[in-house]
């Protein structure tokens, strides 16, 4: 199913497929006196699988929520597919598929009805979305439960349904926060394959995760955020060089780069690495 | 026992944080509601102080007769309180004992199930009883004050009330535990809520038939005495309310022997029912709780393209597909969520009580009927505002934690909010028009009043829906899970205040045209209809503003909303 997922879409697409799909420019988000995201600058090109890592409370979910239009930035700019998420929220949202970490859904709708609702909200017509819903439910092994109320779904089934809903409108950008939470090994394998294939078809994926092995396996580039600031960004090799620990895994790199350090604590600035270098 | 103390201490800690770590908005709301509560307590006290004072001051009646009447009144208060306690405990025991979220944690901890049960049951008892205590204690304080009771009376009052709340709480628990053997928890809760609404209607009708307004301003002492004598209070000597009444009377008169007798009855009843409750809980509680967990997971299979689905799609064929999707979603969620549609029963009861009251108003002349009809317009508006507070105001908040779906979707908030508006304006219009039409038929008003009332209530329905939906979006409460509690907040309070001001403005604007019409009835040459145009124009203009402005503000607020 995933092999031809975007073929027709891109042929008729009016959105530029070239250049940066995600642009974060000096993004800042403050909650009262707490700075959750500080001066975050990132550019992610089309078709890149970008992993966003960081300790608890580092600002990962806040960044994703700003990108999805759920939060407004205090300063800076976010552009998705060339659309500013504050100035042009509707065209930006149209090309985004958002998968949150906690899947609160309409409990009193069935899985199929929920997907129908999402498809109609994204302006798809019933001729195109009905077979798509059937395929998605089949692919995510939800067909037997498709006509049951979501309230009876397990956590994993809800997560699968959210992923289906994020894909139904063929998004150019997928924003995903901790995708593997609650998924069984089969579900994890399915999602990994899906994301890899979609990236090959030109979809840009921005994934926040704690699962370092997942990021290591799937992501083209990885960004590490700590105390709201991007402390490093690059491929695994580049990060290893920056952390000055040769021949090691992502876990050691991550721990080294997010180590409690006076240089970070005192000024809120990391002097060790140039994140965008 | 130590574990039980730990649970109580933790609950105390939560309560302390709730009280001492209030956010600004909550603090404001708390002080506002607190002030209203104090006003209510003061009003309650003064009302009964006046009645007891009046009874005490009637010189033509012998003392024993006055005391007899007082006993009857107190008996009525205790009986009403007992019924309310019983009902309230029945209603809260299922959600408290079986559906609370903290039960998952408590049941998984190394705690005795008996301790968990006792902790939850006693918490539920306090929750169910405090309102009844707030209402009844000022009455007993007024009684003590008028009949010059000593400190002993007030000390005993505390003990009597404590024993008084235990028995209905235990009975409520026993009934709930027993019902859980046969029905799923949610079904019992709905059943009890339905029964409660019916009881409420019956109670209102009974109170209405008593004509309580006569208590406040009795024509003569004999009228009052006749009224009190006609109260057929069930005074069975086996009812806890009877024992409590007697205990209170003997506490005032200082008859220690009889006081201890009735206190013992109350104590035995409380200990007996609680003993029975604990015994049943030991046998049934865990099994009931476990089956409640299973019923939560029970699946409901619904075929695609059901009759309901096709009907809604057919009716909304002309609507923009995106907003049609929103409307279909809202209708389905409403009809499938018992906590939402069950409020319709309350609405039915409200209409019944309303029309019942209208029917019982004495109407000596056509002139008086028309005046009442005009007043009824304001009252109808108020009922409409209350209904809109229950249904239209929560329209945005009811999205709950799923609001991220809307917020991250390419939806225009203007369309989102107006789709909510249209969802509620049609049923509210129907309700209001039927209510006013039926009232006017009962009042036998003339065609002018009928037309004016129907036109005005039409505008009011539209305006109050716009105000409700708009302000609901201005003050969203996505975190509140209980649908009925969404309007109980700062936004809901503002909505009610603005609604009342709006209704008063509309009624005020129509006073002049009504005056002209009534004057023309007396003198057909009186004034021309042209003078009414600015006033009716004002009604249309104000209603349009009250519809549009809050909707616009609501749209802006949602566009700015940040979902953290």
Image (cartoon, coloured by chain):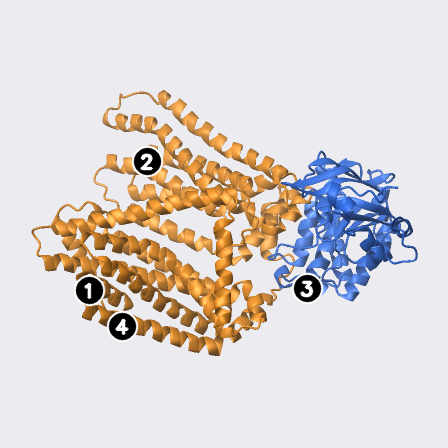
Chain colours: A blue, B orange
Q: What residue do we see at 71% from left, 35% from top?
A: A75
Read off the chain for label 3: A
- Closer to the eye: label 3 or 4: 4
- Residues behind callouts 4 and 1 on a single chain: yes
Residue A9 lies in quadrant: top right
| Crowd band around label 3 with a 10 angstrom C-alpha radius: few (<14), some (14–19), many (20+) | many
Label 4, label 2: how far apart the Cα atoms are: 56 Å
Give the percent coordinates (x, y) of residue B95: 49, 63
Label 4, label 1: how far apart the Cα atoms are: 13 Å
Read off the chain for label 2: B
Q: What residue do we see at 84% from left, 57% from top?
A: A252
Label 1, label 3: how far apart the Cα atoms are: 66 Å
Q: Give the mark, 4 or 2, whose residue is nearer the N terminus.
A: 4
Q: What residue do we see at 49% from left, 63% from top?
A: B9
Q: Give the mark, 1 or 2, whose residue is nearer the N terminus.
A: 1
The answer to whether the residue labelled 4 contacts the one labelled 1, judged by CB atoms less than 8 Å apart, is: no
Residue behind mark 3: A145
- Secondary element type, mark 1: helix
Residue A249's place in the image compared with B416, above or below, is below
- Secondary element type, mark 2: helix
């Amino acid at each position: 199913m995933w092999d031809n997922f975007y073929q027709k879409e891109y042929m008729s697409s009016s959105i530029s497929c070239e250049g940066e799909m995600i642009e974060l420019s000096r993004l800042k988000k403050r909650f009262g006196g707490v700075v959750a995201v500080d001066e975050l600058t990132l550019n992610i090109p089309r078709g890149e699988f970008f992993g966003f890592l960081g300790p608890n409370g580092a600002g990962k979910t806040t960044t994703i929520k700003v990108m999805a239009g759920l939060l407004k930035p205090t300063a800076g700019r976010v552009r998705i597919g060339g659309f500013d998420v504050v100035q042009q929220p509707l065209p930006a949202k149209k090309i985004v598929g958002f998968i949150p970490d906690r899947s609160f859904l309409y409990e009193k709708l069935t899985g199929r009805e929920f997907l129908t609702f999402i498809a109609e909200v994204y302006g798809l017509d019933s001729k195109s979305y009905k077979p798509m819903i059937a395929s998605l439910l089949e692919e995510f092994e939800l067909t037997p439960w498709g006509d049951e109320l979501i309230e009876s779904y397990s956590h994993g089934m809800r997560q699968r349904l959210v992923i289906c809903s994020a894909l139904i409108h063929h998004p150019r950008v997928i924003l995903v926060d901790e995708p593997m939470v609650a998924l069984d090994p089969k579900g994890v394998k399915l999602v990994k394959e899906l994301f890899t294939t979609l990236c090959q078809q030109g979809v840009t994926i921005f994934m926040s995760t704690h699962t370092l092995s997942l990021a290591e396996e799937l992501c083209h580039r990885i960004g590490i955020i700590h105390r709201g600031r991007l402390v490093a960004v690059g491929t695994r090799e580049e990060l290893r060089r920056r952390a000055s620990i040769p021949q090691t895994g992502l876990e050691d790199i991550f721990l080294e780069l997010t180590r409690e350090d006076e240089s970070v604590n005192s000024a809120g600035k990391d002097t060790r690495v140039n994140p965008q270098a | 026992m130590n574990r039980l103390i730990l649970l109580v201490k933790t609950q105390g800690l939560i309560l302390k944080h709730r009280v001492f770590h209030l956010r600004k908005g909550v603090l404001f709301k708390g002080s506002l509601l607190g002030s209203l509560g104090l006003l209510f307590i003061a009003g309650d006290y003064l009302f009964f102080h006046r009645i007891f004072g009046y009874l005490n001051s009637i010189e033509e009646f012998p003392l024993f007769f006055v005391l007899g009447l007082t006993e009857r009144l107190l008996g009525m208060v205790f009986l009403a309180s007992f019924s309310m306690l019983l009902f309230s405990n029945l209603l809260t025991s299922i959600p408290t004992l079986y559906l609370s979220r903290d039960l998952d944690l408590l049941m998984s901890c190394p705690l005795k199930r008996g301790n968990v049960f006792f902790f939850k049951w006693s918490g539920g008892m306090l929750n169910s009883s405090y309102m009844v205590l707030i209402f009844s204690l000022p009455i007993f304080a007024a009684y003590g004050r008028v009949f010059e009771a000593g400190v002993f009376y007030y000390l005993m009052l505390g003990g009597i009330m404590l024993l008084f709340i235990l028995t209905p709480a235990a009975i409520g628990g026993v009934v709930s535990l027993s019902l859980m053997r046969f029905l799923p928890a949610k079904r019992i809760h709905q059943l009890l809520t339905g029964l409660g609404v019916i009881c409420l209607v019956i109670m209102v009708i009974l109170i209405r038939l008593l004509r309580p307004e006569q208590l406040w301003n009795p024509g003569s002492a004999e009228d009052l005495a006749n009224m009190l004598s006609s109260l057929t209070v069930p005074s069975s000597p086996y009812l806890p309310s009877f024992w409590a009444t007697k205990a209170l009377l003997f506490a005032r008169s200082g008859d220690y022997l009889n006081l201890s007798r009735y206190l013992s009855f109350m104590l035995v009843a409380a200990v007996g029912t609680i003993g029975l409750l604990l015994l049943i809980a030991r046998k049934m509680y865990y099994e009931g709780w476990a089956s409640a967990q299973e019923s939560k997971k029970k699946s409901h299979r619904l075929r695609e393209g059901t009759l309901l689905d096709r009907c809604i799609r057919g009716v909304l064929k002309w609507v923009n597909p995106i907003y049609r999707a929103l409307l279909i979603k809202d209708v389905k969620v409403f009809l499938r969520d018992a906590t939402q549609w069950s409020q319709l029963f309350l609405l039915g009861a409200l209409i019944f009580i309303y029309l019942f009251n209208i029917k019982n108003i004495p109407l000596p002349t056509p002139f008086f009927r028309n005046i009442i009809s005009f007043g009824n317009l304001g009252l109808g508006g108020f009922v409409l505002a209350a209904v809109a507070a229950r249904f239209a105001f929560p329209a945005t908040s009811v999205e709950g934690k799923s609001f991220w779906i809307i917020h991250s979707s390419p939806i225009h908030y203007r369309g989102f909010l107006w789709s909510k508006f249209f969802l509620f304006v049609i049923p509210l219009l129907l309700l209001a028009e039927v209510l006013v039409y039926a009232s006017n038929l009962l009042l036998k008003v003339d065609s002018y009043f009928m037309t004016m009332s129907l036109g005005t209530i039409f505008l009011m329905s539209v305006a109050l829906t716009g105000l409700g939906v708009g302000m609901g979006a201005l003050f969203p409460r996505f975190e509140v899970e209980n649908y009925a509690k969404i309007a109980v907040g700062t936004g809901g309070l503002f909505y009610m205040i603005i609604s009342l001001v709006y209704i008063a403005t509309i009624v005020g604007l129509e006073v002049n045209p009504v005056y002209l019409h009534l004057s023309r009835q007396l003198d057909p040459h009186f004034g021309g209809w042209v003078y009414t145009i600015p006033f009716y124009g004002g009604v249309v203009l104000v209603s349009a503003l009250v519809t549009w402005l809050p909707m616009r503000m609501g749209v802006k607020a949602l566009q700015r909303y940040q979902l953290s």
